Each structure stands twice: as structure tokens, then as C-alpha cells.
Image: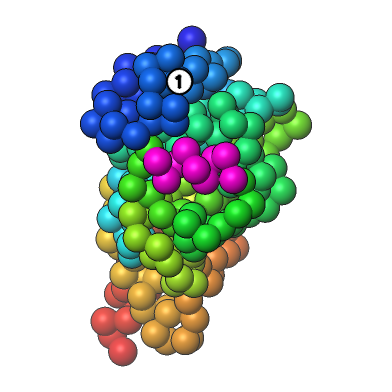
Amino acid sequence: MSIGVRRRAILYPEVFGVRGRASGSSSAGNQRLVDAAGGPDACLGIHEDILQRMVDHAVREISGAKYAGVTTAGFPAQLDTVVMTHPYAAVVDAIQQYRHQGPFLSAAWKRDVLRVNDLESDDRWPAYRRDVLRSTPIRSLLSFRLFTTAKSVGALMVYANEPNAFDRHAEQIGYVVATHTALAVGGGQPRDLVRHVLDNWDKVAQAEAFLMERFQIGRAEAFQMLKRLSLSSNADLVGLSQRVIDKARQL
């Protein structure tokens, strides 16, 4: 049993007990949700401490965000909540696993970004929708695909308690955070470099802000510009960001 599944098995009874509104309102129904979340770990070898910092950062940086988590799935879909900022992220994943429907299962294999504005009025996944509304205060969400292989997929999931909590700007910020998360999951950058970027996030953010103002672009475009400059000049992303900041101070 994976770390994420063991964590969920401990958390679900407490979460559903606090809400008192689990689907079916019975301990047996709650246990079925827990059991349905089982399966092999789809993300062995991931540095969970890095990913935990990523989801914490997502909640701080994305306007309207209340909770976040990294969800992975194997093929056939066996969901695992690798890290989370609150047990609700694991509850939502368990509901998707149990009901065989939901935004992660629908979008993670096919789309880079998915936004649900209001679960109250969204009818794409009726059973999932009903259970989430009964069991959590979540009303809107964002999903950012992190990676896709022949046998697995991962996504950064961000949740809010209010409907229509996320706009285009939130998507742009989330895209940047998801890019960093993808690096940690196993992209082209070494994990020690990912830690370096995280430890110096303020420098990257300041450089992005300068580029956004100078070129009238969004945060996602500014980050992509920094990344392209970093690759083309073979320069460290943080070091390049510092150079951009120094240049901005001279103007």
C-alpha cells in the first residue's frame, strides 16, 4: 500500500465524521470510499518533501485557492494523492476512484488545464459532483497536468470553497507553479536545481514581474521567457533572474 493510500485510510473517517454528510451517511459507505482508493503507487521515487512545498506554494500564490494536492494515476486508473495541503484533496480523489468519474479522470490524460467554475451547476460528473458537495465545502477547482506516460499521469489539483474562485490570471499562476512541480516530478531538471529554484522563488517572481511590466505579458509568458533565456544562455534560472532584477534596477 502506498504512502498516499495509507495516509488517506487514516484521514477519511475523521474528515467525513466532521462533515457528517458522507454519501450514504454510513460507516460502510465511508469505508467503501477508502477501500476504492487502493492500488499501486503510481509515483515511486518522487521527493515528497519537494512536492509538499509545491502544493503549499500553490495555495499561497493562486488567488482564491484554499486547498491543493498532487494526484497520480496508473493504467487502469488507480488514483493516489501523493501530497496535499488538507485532507479534502484526498477525499475528492477517493470519490473519483469510487465513482469512476471526475475532472482528474476526464482531463488529466487529455488536457493540460481544466477549470470547474461551479460544482453546483456543473453536470459533467453527476455522482462525483453529488458526493463532493455532500462531503466537502469545495465548489470550484483547477487541474494542471504535470506529466503523461504510457502507463501513468499526474496533475496538480487546486480547490476553492467559493464558486467562480478562479479566473484567467489564476490559471496563469497555476501554470507556472505546475511547471515547477513537473520539474520535481521528474522532468528535465535535476531535483537539487528544483530545490534551488524553490529556495529562491522570490527572485524568480521579481524577475517575472519586471518582464510582465516591461513587455505587457502575463506571468506564464514571463516565466516561459525566463526559461528560454536560461536554456539559450546555459544560465541557472535563479542566477538569470537576479541579472534581470539588477538590470531593472539600473533603468
Q: How is the image coloured?
A: rainbow
Q: Which residue is drawn at the image coordinates 71% and 34% (left, top)?
A: 149
Q: Nearer the viewer, residue 211 or 51?
A: 51
Which residues fall within the magenta stretch? 126-134
Q: Is residue 192 visible?
A: no
Q: Is residue 97 visible?
A: yes
User: Percent from the top left, x then y, of residue 104?
Assistant: 58, 42
Most distant residue in the top direction = 1
The question of residue 128 being in magenta is answered with yes
The question of residue 200 being in magenta is answered with no
Q: Main secondary structure of the magenta part?
A: helix
Most distant residue in the bottom direction = 251
Q: Which residue is drawn at the image coordinates 66% and 45% (left, top)?
A: 106
Q: Is residue 129 above or below residue 244?
A: above
Apparent side of residue 162 relative to residue 81 in the rendered image (left or right): left
User: Percent from the top left, x then y, of residue 29?
Assistant: 45, 20
User: Percent from the top left, x then y, of residue 14?
Assistant: 27, 24
Q: Tell me where residue 192 sits by quadrant.
A: top left
Most distant residue in the right direction = 150
Q: Is residue 29 above or below residue 142?
A: above
Q: Amino acid at mark 1?
A: Gly
Label tally? 1
Q: Is residue 238 above or below residue 184?
A: below
Kind of element beneath mark 1: helix
Where does label 1 land, which residue? 29
User: Percent from the top left, x then y, of residue 47?
Assistant: 42, 28
Crowding at dot 1, Cα within 10 Å, few <14 / some 14-19 / many 20+, comes out as few
